[in-house]
Image (cartoon, rainbow, N blue to C red):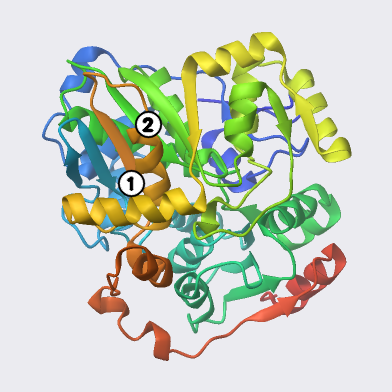
Amino acid sequence: MRYVSTRGEAPVLSFEEAMMTGLARDGGLYVPETIPTLSKDEIAALAGASYEDTAFAIMKPYIGDAFTDEEFKAIIARAYEGFGHAARAPMVQLAPNHFLLELFHGPTLAFKDFAMQLIGQLFQASLSRSGKRVTIVGATSGDTGSAAIEAFRGLSNVDVFILFPHGRVSEVQRRQMTTPSEDNVHALAVHGDFDDCQARVKDMFNHFEFRDAVGLAGVNSINWARVLAQVVYYFYSAVALGAPGREVSFTVPTGNFGDIFAGYIAKRMGLPVDKLVVATNQNDILHRALTSGGYVTDGVTPSISPSMDIQVSSNFERALFDAYDRDGKAVAQLMDELKAKGGFQISQGALQVLQETFASGRASEEETMATIKSSFEVTGEVLCPHSAVGVKVAEEQPASATPMITLATAHPAKFPAAVKEACGQDAPLPARMADLYDRDERVTEIANDLSAIEALIHERRAH
């Protein structure tokens, strides 16, 4: 399996090379040259399989010869052994044809753990083999950072620097990033929003002298391995509801488009997906783009669902690449316009392709709060604000005999103030995190300045 850049000018790489590279050197994102497909019989054979066995079956075609079957199975087993539920991704029923896929039973209580725990094991296996040392940088709107720190803390051949927007994540999200005591992890509170943090990470990757000097590696969803790990739970949940014998639909609360893009890959692989519904909060650039064709940044308004407070959705570039028939030059031009003018217009043909695949909706702050309240009153299920955005948008879709699965992306305990205000319920942390508020924090505030951030990384990383 070979990987190509969405902008068409970077070297073609193997899986392991693409994973360790992160962002392509032409500024694009790596995607598989071809998408492997599974037959109906192969999908049906996943019925009753464990999450780990499903993960092996779905991801193995993408790995190539990077790891032997035995090595890869052991990596998967280590990745998910720390999850707090034996099913890893259990489902609960909200209504006659509406199901909630709980993706928050990992170590940091968010869906990012499914990918980050796996990528941590993949990195460790690869680096142990090569003897190399890398510096991981990541930007987070709340959940990626804590998942990355949890996955890489204490590893001897990795330094981790996570950029998060100062004052714009929940207290639980912040403390999960700032309380680990290992010397190789560093939480940087950037004076700006998530888009600023993400832009500085991309700037570092595009500053080749710095990139090469520190051995830069990325774990944001610019990294293909992150997206690949998320494809698994689409198959796992759909098969549990009868796929491939019947279609399923998914509603996905998303800001950076990675989680819903994983659903698109599952569909391309042969999973019978009827609808993929993008659910956005008040920062609704994806909803606006998919309905009007205009991708125009409009500033970020802080919300009670901070992980979706994004205007530059990195993974949307991967969807555009396919919508433009894999024309790297066309995608590069759109990304240049986005950088120079703050937006671009999707061509009519590409928009039609996107609209045939994705539906979309949005939820205001008031609608999100109302959904948390009504969900608790009707079902007893306490939703985090992001999951509530998904449930609200899912409930607005036209009635259908096709079951709808809404992705619950975080545990309500990560957003206790919003949950308490919405439905009057406390959302306690699991016992293993009960002392989170008592732990000492280590954090560095820093300006939204590339040279300052690079200088700090040079200074702090192990040499």
Please say whether residue 107 is visible from this viewpoint. Answer: no
Distance (Cα) linking label 1 and label 2: 44 Å
For label 1, the crowd category at 10 Å Cα-Cα, with few meaning under 14, some 14 to 19 and many 20 or more, is: few
Viewer-proximal residue among 9 and 345: 345
Amino acid type, mark 2? Glu
Measured from the top left, where is residue 105 in percent x and y? 28, 59
Q: Is residue 293 left or right of residue 271?
A: right
Quick one: which residue is furthest to the left in this view?
A: 48
Residue at 23% over, 51% down: 88
Please say whether residue 319 is visible from this viewpoint. Answer: yes
Q: Is residue 445 above or below residue 282?
A: below
Tell me which corner region of the image, top left, top right, bottom left or bottom right, holds residue 64. top left
Viewer-proximal residue among 189 and 396: 396
Mark 1 vs mark 2: which is more N-terminal?
1
Residue at 20% over, 16% down: 246
Would you name the residue on which mark 1 appears?
71
For label 2, the crowd category at 10 Å Cα-Cα, with few meaning under 14, some 14 to 19 and many 20 or more, is: few
Viewer-proximal residue among 76 and 298: 298
Quick one: which residue is furthest to the top in this view?
A: 349
Q: Is residue 438 above or below residue 313?
A: below
Q: Which mark is residue 448?
A: none
Residue at 17% over, 15% down: 245
User: What is the count of numbered marks?
Assistant: 2
Measured from the top left, where is residue 338 in percent x and y? 80, 35
Tell me which corner region of the image, top left, top right, bottom left or bottom right, holds residue 380. bottom left
Q: Secondary structure at mark 1?
A: helix
Q: Is residue 154 above or below residue 90?
A: below
Q: Is residue 53 left or right of residue 297?
A: left
Label 1 with label 2: CB-CB less than 8 Å: no
Would you name the residue on which mark 2 appears?
396
Amino acid type, mark 1? Glu
Measured from the top left, where is residue 307 in percent x and y? 53, 55
